[in-house]
Amino acid sequence: MSIRARLNPSSQGVNNNESFGNKPALKPVYATLLIIEAVSSLKACSPKLRTRTPQQALPLPVHVVHEFPKGTWVENLAVRQNDQILATILTAPEIYQVDPLGIVSPILVHTFTSTTGVTGIVETEPDIFYVATGNFSFATFTNEPGSWAIWKVDLRLFSVFAPATVTKVADFPQASLLNGLTLLDNGKGIVLAADSFLGVVWSLNVNTGQVAQLLADPLMKPTAVSSSKNGINGIKIRDGALFFTNSNTEIFARLPINKNGTAAGVASIVASGLSGDDFQFDNKGDAFVALNSANSLGFIAAGSTDSVVVLAGSQDSFVLAGPTACQFGRTLLDEGSLYVSSTGGVAAYKTGNFTVGGRISRIDVGYEGY
């Protein structure tokens, strides 16, 4: 597998324009939340600004939407139907809403108790999300088995006057490190959760709270000799298969599944040699992968064989310091843009020497989401 960057890393830069300027405040700003709906309505009525443009000069510019304080690990994100961004925080048990236009300061959606952080997030119905929480120590970079749970976050009535409705769906006493989430069957309410430490996939019926181990494939496991025990990480379902990254073995893989989510074969490697975290597909089947330890956003073309193109960032740059996940915008203005969450750089959490904070950034890739 070759990872190709087409420009010198030293030529890369971060675009911090006023429209997407940094907002340091983290406290709730509910009095200005009404602005969000008005802006979203205007955006939905605006003409399309971009078309699909597969051939662009690389690396692509990175626009910082918001930078959190140094030492804030933004683990994952989702984009609401009104285009507001939900960011899950691993260094604190919190979810924030981030305005992609930078007009409104980040809003604290919810703080969980009796847990240290939030990992995966998935939307099952408009403005109904499920998130995973658990205990993770940044002092030792270890997780606490049995501390993990999945919660429902209902934002349908979330407004200036009403908080999010948050309820626990199920505990996962046998899980070790819940990470990426994806939706298997909306009609039956089945959500899948990757367990990075155990190298398995759990299923959760969000209607009944029933938990079961659904998938276990050798390619999902971390290697026994590695100090990093994060195997399977991001997961997505497309075209009758579960796609996943394995951060430890540095692969992007595909496992054919039946309609009920059980394995219909064995997993195979799509691409290797990439430090993949979470990822997203476009509407053509191309994959955009957050390359966490490589400080980059990778691109795997549909049908390609073991080839990854670096779209933005570089190993020696802080443009994308520790990217963790990416999601497409949901309006005509930004459907060709990826929003990327990042940590500030994994190494900084071990040394304590932070250059940048965790961020939500925007990269205009010119492709449309799946």
Image (cartoon, rainbow, N blue to C red):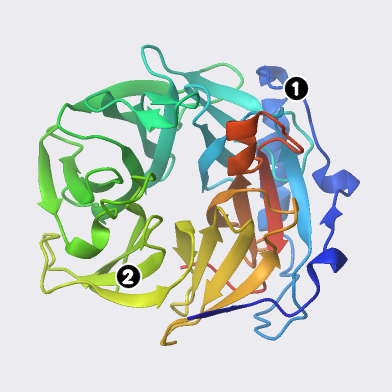
Displayed quadrant of residue 13: bottom right
Q: Secondary structure at mark 1?
A: loop
According to the picture, the residue beneath numbered tag 1 turns out to be 25
Disc ID at residue 253: 2
- What separation in Å lies between label 1 and label 2 (alpha carbons)? 39 Å
Residue positioned 58% across, 33% down in the render: 350
Dot 2 falls on a residue whose secondary structure is strand
In the rendered image, the vertical position of residue 123 relative to residue 210, given as above or below: below
Residue 350 numbered mark, or none: none
Depicted 305 relative to depicted 46: above or below: below
Q: Residues within 10 Å of mark 2 (few under 14, many from 20)?
A: many
Question: How many C-alpha atoms fall within 10 Å of the one at disc 1: few (<14), some, or many (≥20)?
Answer: few
For residue 125, say whether it is visible: no
Q: Residue at x 68, y 41 (%)?
A: 359
With respect to residue 358, does 215 lie above or below?
A: below
Q: Amino acid at mark 1?
A: Ala
Residue 22 on image: x %, y %:
81, 37
Residue 143, image x and y in percent? 35, 29
Please give the count of numbered marks on the rendered protein: 2
Residue 217 location (% of width, % of height): 17, 61
Residue 271: quarter of image: bottom left
Q: Residue at x 78, y 54 (%)?
A: 63
- Could you tell me the amino acid type at mark 2? Ala
Q: Is residue 81 above or below residue 207?
A: below
